Amino acid sequence: MDGLTGRFREFVLTMRTSIPRFPPPFVFRRRSTWTLALAFVLGVVVPNSSAQPLRSESPGAESLVVRFIDVGQGDSILLKTSSGRGWLIDGGQSTRDVTQAILKSMEEEGLSKLDGILMTHPHLDHFGGLSRLVEVVEVGRVFYNIDVPAPTYQGFVKKLAARGIPYERVNPGLLDWGADVTVDVIAAKAQEEFDRELIREAQRTETPIEEYAESLLDLCGSSSTLALNLNDYSIVLHVSYGSFDLLLTGDATEEVETQALAQQRVPDGEVLKVAHHGSRYSSTRAFLDRFTPELAIIQVGAGNSYGHPHAESLDRLSQVGSDSRRNDHDGTIRLQVRSDGSYRISPRSQTPALPLE
Ligand SMILES: [Zn+2]
């Protein structure tokens, strides 16, 4: 074993063994406590907004609610199951506005806590906002796929440990998010593969492991020239509710899509959270032909420097007959899904997703 590899293993081992496993917290905070926490993080209680709140139109109805929260350039998706559980997939960038947007969506759905959070991959536009969120919201557990030995990421992991929030690795297969919804991890590359790739690239570029790992966290990574791309490790979730099928793809790359297709894990579905903010390198035609979305949601910030979404991706979506909605046009997008597979989209107003000619 060479010195670098040895040091890396020791570092990873220290990081992993220093994370205590706590039992799930069973403390149910009263609403007043949560409201105080909300006021604390915002500096004020949720400010008046000129936008219409996307409140449930029929709160008693059996339905799954999915909110694609407008967090600018980044991803954050809130699920509220028909039994009232709240799950968050990704948490946007580390800004006060992002925290405010997530808290506002939770409040509008009547959620005062989260049963769990899943990080699709450790890019800052997906996990950056979670560090502030876990300070003000009770969270049952946090799911991850790749643990990166980067100081910023490990700071978040230590915060979870300090707050007694279990930090759990997911593998391909079913997650138990309640009997009323089926959540299947259809892609999640192994930690061991990441560790090998990280050691190899750090050695090749003669960069200390921690420094190389930190450089991997850079937002979407699309501006990066690094050979190792965290998007290749993105979790892809298949969420089913009755006959409704939703795919949440994180920043999955063509490699991830191709592998999921080869393993016959891609269903025929209704709504697609478009991978990697509409990057041209994701949403391949073969993948779209298999899933055949009716509706594509693109989580993207206005005027982002990455050129997201790319015209080629939008073209491919329209070629398979999919309608598209974007956070930079519509703000937060809310779906209310009934068990017969029908769903309602808010806001109703639709701005064309395709660039105007
Ligand atoms: Zn991203």
Image: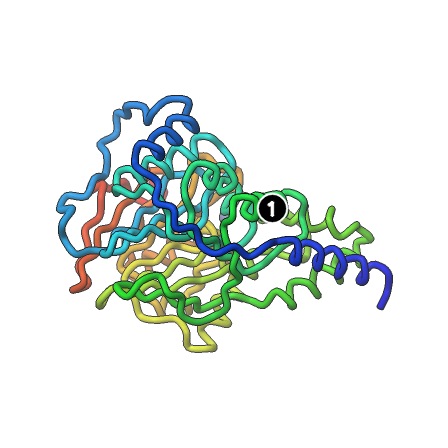
Residue visible at 55% across and 57% down in the picture: 21
Colour approach in the figure: rainbow
- Between 85 and 313, the residue placed more toward the observer is 85
Q: Is residue 287 above or below residue 202?
A: below
Q: Quadrant of residue 241?
A: bottom left
Residue visible at 43% across and 29% down in the picture: 41
Looking at the picture, how far across and down is residue 201, in whole percent? 74, 58
Q: Is residue 248 visible?
A: yes
Q: Is residue 134 left or right of residue 314?
A: right
Residue visible at 74% across and 55% down in the picture: 11
Q: Is residue 329 above or below residue 284?
A: above
Looking at the picture, how far across and down is residue 113, in whole percent? 35, 44
Looking at the picture, how far across and down is residue 83, in whole percent? 24, 56
- Between 114 and 328, the residue placed more toward the observer is 114
Crowding at dot 1, Cα within 10 Å, few <14 / some 14-19 / many 20+, comes out as some
Looking at the picture, how far across and down is residue 65, in whole percent? 25, 51
Q: Is residue 357 visible?
A: no
Image quadrant in which the C terminus is located? top left
**Residue under pointer 1:** 158
Image quadrant in which the N terminus is located? bottom right
Residue visible at 40% across and 54% down in the picture: 274
Taking the view exactly as shown, the residue that stands out farthest to the bottom is 263
The tally of labels here is: 1
Under mark 1, the amino acid is: Lys
Q: Is residue 148 left or right of residue 258?
A: right
Q: Quadrant of residue 152?
A: top right
Label 1 secondary element: helix
Q: Is residue 132 left or right of residue 294?
A: right
Q: Is residue 16 above or below residue 300?
A: below
